[in-house]
Image: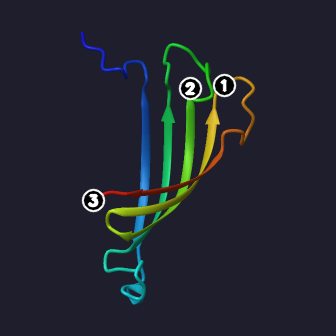
Amino acid sequence: TINNGTAGQPGWYAELAYDFFPASWRGKHVLLTDESAFTIVVRVEGLDLNEATEGTTLRDDISAVTIGFCFRPVRRTVIKIAYAFVDSELPGFGSGEGNQFVLEWSSYF
């Protein structure tokens, strides 16, 4: 048997994304190119880092709903702003305690 490091650590997610960009904005600025796009994203996910136990750490037995907005000035660069509503089965975990605001930038070539 080969242990791939994920046995007993199930997770899942479902994501909806909608891309849009006003045609009249294209080429109006150095950041508004023919490849530019805005994306609205909603993601629902669940993760259990240790299937054998329940609620052992803040990151074990979590579920989250994330709502985000992305801007791609070009296809290979993205700026993301999102808010994650996080829930955990950790005893004593208060409502909203794990929620987080996320700002990301990514680029590659």
Does the residue at mark 1 contact the one at mark 2 (Cβ under 8 Å)?
A: yes
58 displayed left or right of 22: right
Give the camera-side residue of 34 and 54.
Answer: 34
Q: Is residue 61 above or below residue 53?
A: below
- Give the residue at x 64% y 27%: 89
Residue 1 point in image, percent of width and height: 24, 9
Residue 84 point in image, percent of width and height: 59, 48
Tell me, what colour scheme is on the image? rainbow
> Residue at the top extreme?
1
Nearer the observer: mark 1 or 3; the answer is 3
- Give the residue at x 43% y 32%: 11
46 displayed left or right of 1: right
Q: Does label 2 or label 3 sit earlier along the sequence?
A: 2
Q: Which residue is mark 1?
A: 90
Q: Does label 1 or label 2 sit earlier along the sequence?
A: 2
The image quarter in which residue 55 lies: top right
58 displayed left or right of 46: right
Mark 2: few/some/many CA within 10 Å (<14, 14-19, 20+): many
- Distance between the Cα atoms at labels 2 and 3? 35 Å
- Give the residue at x 41% y 74%: 20
- Distance between the Cα atoms at labels 1 and 2? 7 Å
Give the secondary structure at mark 2. loop
Q: Which residue is mark 3?
A: 109
Give the secondary structure at mark 3. loop
Q: Name the residue type under label 2.
A: Asp
Q: Where is the C terminus found, in terms of image quarters?
A: bottom left
Q: Which residue is mark 2?
A: 60
Q: Name the residue type under label 1.
A: Leu
